[in-house]
């Protein structure tokens, strides 16, 4: 529950554009380093949150992997341009791409995202970061 309180304070600070100190970032990273299933529950009683929300441990992971440790995902998403998205969407409709996705480069399989990204890099001339960002975007849109 302390983790949930920590997450709420983080969210409020972010919403109010408060600069987060290095000590707070290090505390959040050390809490995250405890590992899955080892983050303590605590004893605080918090009011319920209305609407959809992630569990505190998952939210902690998202925060640490995003703004605290460098934000590879943000860089990946920034590399995606609308032109590249249109070009990739058109390429995914081709038979070459359909064969690749159907036979072997399943996006959810181990290494499948990378194989598909490498093919997009070679065929479409995108950066690898842009290709991975597009794959993520297409999975969210359920195109892949």
Image (cartoon, rainbow, N blue to C red):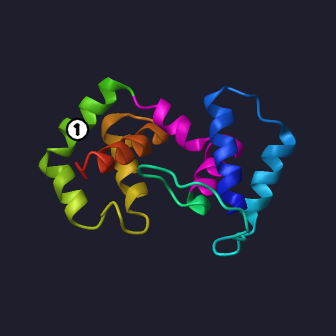
- Report whether residue 101 is seen: yes
User: Mark 1 sits on what residue?
Assistant: 89
Q: 89 or 65, which lies in front?
A: 65
Q: Is residue 91 left or right of residue 21?
A: left
Indicate yes or no whether the magenta region holds residue 35.
no
Magenta residues, dominant SS class: helix
Secondary structure at badge 1 equals: helix
Residue placed at 53% from the left, 55% from the top? 48
- Report whether residue 70 is seen: no
User: Eyeballing the image, is 130 above or below 64?
Assistant: above
Q: In the rendering, at what x and y percent does residue 86 appear? A: 24, 30
Magenta part of the protein: which range?
Answer: 59-80
Q: In the rendering, at what x and y percent does residue 20 appear? A: 77, 35
Residue placed at 83% from the left, 36% from the top? 21
Q: In the rendering, at what x and y percent does residue 119 appear? A: 34, 49
Q: In the rendering, at what x and y percent does residue 46 appear? A: 63, 57
Residue placed at 50% from the left, 56% from the top? 54
Q: Residue furthest bottom?
A: 37
Q: 18 or 63, which lies in front?
A: 18
Indicate yes or no whether the magenta region holds residue 62.
yes
User: Eyeballing the image, is 65 above or below 55?
Assistant: above
Residue placed at 49% from the left, 40% from the top? 129
Q: Residues within 10 Å of mark 1 (few under 14, many from 20)?
A: some
Task: Locate the N terminus and report the quarter of the image it occupies.
Answer: bottom right
How many numbered discs, if any?
1
């Amino acid at each position: 529950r302390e983790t949930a309180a920590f997450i709420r304070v983080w969210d409020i600070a972010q919403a109010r554009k408060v600069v987060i100190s290095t000590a707070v970032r290090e505390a959040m990273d050390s809490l995250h380093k405890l590992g899955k299933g080892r983050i303590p529950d605590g004893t605080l009683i918090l009011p319920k949150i209305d609407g959809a929300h992630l569990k505190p441990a998952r939210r902690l992971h998202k925060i640490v992997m995003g703004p605290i440790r460098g934000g590879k995902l943000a860089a990946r998403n920034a590399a995606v341009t609308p032109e590249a998205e249109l070009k990739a969407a058109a390429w995914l409709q081709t038979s070459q791409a359909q064969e690749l996705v159907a036979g072997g480069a399943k996006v959810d399989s181990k290494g499948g995202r990378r194989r598909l990204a490498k093919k997009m890099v070679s065929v479409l001339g995108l950066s690898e970061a842009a290709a991975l960002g597009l794959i993520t975007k297409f999975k969210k849109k359920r195109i892949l």
